[in-house]
Image (cartoon, rainbow, N blue to C red):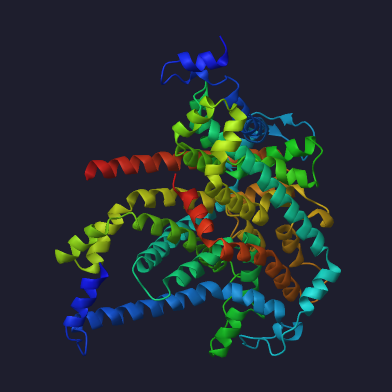
Amino acid sequence: MTVPNTRARVARPARPTPPLRERHARRRRWLLTAVLTAVAIVVVFPLYWMIVSALTPGGQSQSSEFYLWPDAPTINNFTEVFATQPVWQWLGNSAFVASVGTALSVCVSLGAGYALAKYRFRGRGLLYAAFLVTIMIPIQVTLVPAFLVTARLGLVDSPWAVILPTLFDVVGIFIARQFMLGVPDALIEAARLDGAGELRTFFRVVLPTCWPLVGVLVILGFMNRWNDFLWPLVVLQGNESLTVPVGLSTLTNNPAFSSPWGAVMAVATVAVVPLLVVFLVFQRTFVQGIASTGIK
Amino acid sequence: MSPRDEVLTRRPDDGARQPRWAPYLFVGPAGLLFLAFSLLPIVIAITLSFQDTATLGDGEWVGAANYETMLGDPLLRTALLNTLVFTVGTVPTAMAIGLALAVALNRPLPGRGLLRALFFVPMIAAGVVVGVIMSWIFNPDYGVANNALAALGLSGLPWLTSPNTAMFTLIAVVVWTRIGFCMVIYLGALQSIPAELREAAAIDGASGWQRLRRLTVPMLAPTTSILLILNVVFSLQSFDVIYVMTGGGPGFSTTVLIQYVFRSAFADARMGYAAALGLLLVLILLVFTLLRQRATKRAEELL
């Protein structure tokens, strides 16, 4: 295939300058790239500024001088906030809530997605419709009653108050069902004919074909739980039991700091970096996951 | 008849041979959680909206009093207006920028992968993180925004401290968090438009702008419709950024409906009223969905 191509190129004498139209197109392409790069700098600047501010000593950040990089970068902001606030505790709480919540929720979604995609049973249509309607119910409606239910269960201030009400994840169930519809029926039939039970069929035959789905569900679930704010804010109260976002929100007007912004930016950096790493490593799955929430 | 015989004697596409309990086992956990944390709260919300309830304990039945209060509540009117301004300000802007970026990045460009990743990065930051960063950048005394203006010899702006500008600043910030999402969804849709179609239009002499207006945008209509719904839902539920950056102020200038629900429930301890406000929002969403369906139908008839 490539041989005639090369020959053709060799046979034709190399043109000294490309034709005007092509040059024009190339210039436009570089112009577009320049514009896009400028926009990208504006888009990324706030995150850059977060890191810079976390490394800037209080003296310089509390001035009206314009700078893009601190004169004397320091990690004092980090050491100070970790020494005076239970930041490790917050990180631990967030890690627990996000990982346990994601693990349980992914299991629930996989099971529900499998049943809705691959079984015919009484009430399936109604159940699926009822699930989907909850996408339209905004959190404003369930905020107060869900809080009352949690309070009655005596869970306020416990990590389970954050985990339990968010285990039912309609979007996750929806994505799981869409994916499982694509698992060939013949595969499942074959397993059954070989005498595998229903659970065995699911775990040994269906699940191994679903790893891309599991990846998407885990990344989305973890990100949403790690970043969640309103619900933890409502059900968590003691400073020791907060998650990182809630803890962070308490810092901006914490009287313990004369200039809170260095501390705030340090904790903000700590909150973003784990997700940033996950994003950079699993970029493809990440983007695919976000995109699949939009394809309904 | 043993199970094996059953398998052997069944008709080819007879689904009955699976045990009856199997699907319920798989969907059971989701069903129970749905009952406890989705359906039950909705039922409670409806009950609460007819009660006068403080934080805990049983409320007093007050009939439709909460709904009557809503009619004459000037703060609610402000909150609804703010919600409208916020939604109309964020949704089309984020979608337009997202579309422009997607169209630009759908052609071969140097550094395309990196640019896509950079536009996407704000998506992963928590709303609270975005809120604190932006509060700091737009801080009136030491924020980098005003410091940069001063370095250019301009006077600083009251980004978040004036009722006239706070809402615009918030809208800009939320658009910033949203464009990456819109771009990704539009990019996915653009990649499914056959390249031959665009080439054919180009051969017929259509300019870049004409191709965008007459070919790309109409082909993207289903995606635009999905994005519109998602973005409206996101905007109506935007809480973190506003809570951290302005707390609804100055005054009530940035108090949107969700902020008002939160405030009524947990600051004013009016749980019943908060529940009624939440149900009002469901009504608004329902009307919006119906109107949008109507509009789509009209558009289809016209075409």
**The N terminus of chain A is located in which quarter?**
bottom left
- Can residue A216 be seen? yes
In the rendered image, residue A223, in percent from the top left (x then y), is placed at 62, 55
Front residue of A55 and B293: A55
Quadrant of the image occupied by residue B197:
bottom left
Q: Relative to residue A251, is residue A175 depicted above or below?
A: above
Horizontal side, residue B169 vs residue B192: left or right: right
A229 in relation to A122, above or below: below
Q: Nearer the viewer, residue B191 or A61?
A: B191
Residue at 23%, 61% (x, y): give it: B198
- Relative horizontal placement of residue B68, taking residue B109 as reference (left or right): right
Q: Residue furthest left?
A: B204
Residue B258: x %, y % from top left: 61, 49
Residue at the far front in the pictured view? A3
Side of B196 where B18 appears, left or right: right
Q: Position of residue B302 (x, y in %)?
A: 22, 44
* Front one among A232 and B150: A232
Q: Is residue A226 left or right of residue B169?
A: right
Question: How many callouts does the rendering have?
Answer: 0
Image quadrant of residue B40?
A: top right
* Rendered residue at 25%/57% (across/down): B215
